Image: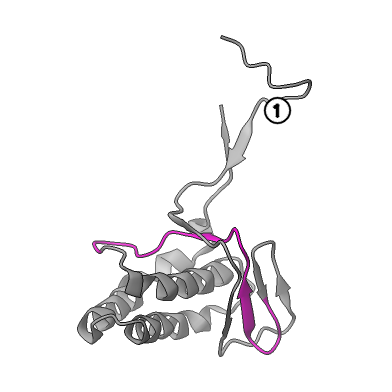
Amino acid sequence: MTFTGGSMTDKCVFYKKGYKYQLTRPYMVKLDVEPITPIDFPYIKIDVSGNLTAKPGYSWDGASGPTIDTKDSIRGSLIHDIGYQLIRLGVVDCKYKEYFDRLLKDICIEDGMCTLRAKLWQWAVLKFGRGSTRPSAEPREEVAP
């Protein structure tokens, strides 16, 4: 069977793997991160005052490691993943890693997560999360077929 989907059909698809969630509406939050210049990526915008906007289409993987995602972890994991991604991309200094780790815990507690569970998550990312802030951890573009 041959696909004849019109006069122009691309032969390849370019994509990135590893995401579970995708924003359908903008999400805004004020961070205690103040970049020297504004950051304006296709799905993330942050001004010099720390006002972050995650735009529709932004994708993230939620909780990592031996745990499960729950409603009380979604917002925290979104902000945490954005923070780590900005560090990986080199637009936010790596000194903010611990800030984003603490923010994960604080947001999860605010959203109803048991304090003990949130503190365990914070401990885990403090202890094991450094590798996820390295540029090599940024998902690479792949191609199929």
| Above or below 4: residue 118 | below
Residue sitting farthest toward the left: 116
Residue sitting farthest toward the top: 1
**In this image, 69 relative to 62: left or right?**
left
Q: Which residue is mark 1?
A: 10
**In this image, 112 relative to 84: left or right?**
left
Read off the magenta span: 46-67
Residue drawn at (64%, 29%) of the image: 12
Residue drawn at (56%, 26%) of the image: 145
The picture places residue 112, in percent across and down from the top left corner, at 30, 82
Pointer 1 local density, CA inside 10 Å: few below 14, some 14–19, many at least 20: few
**In this image, 129 relative to 52: left or right?**
left
- Magenta-span inclusion, residue 38: no
Q: Secondary structure at mark 1?
A: loop
| Above or below 56: residue 121 | below
The part of the image, by quadrant, that contains residue 2 is top right
Residue drawn at (60%, 66%) of the image: 89
The picture places residue 116, in percent across and down from the top left corner, at 21, 84
Q: Main secondary structure of the magenta part?
A: loop
The part of the image, by quadrant, that contains residue 85 is bottom right
The part of the image, by quadrant, that contains residue 127 is bottom left
Which amino acid lies under the numbered mark 1 shown in the image of this protein?
Asp
The picture places residue 45, in percent across and down from the top left corner, at 67, 73
- Magenta-span inclusion, residue 53: yes
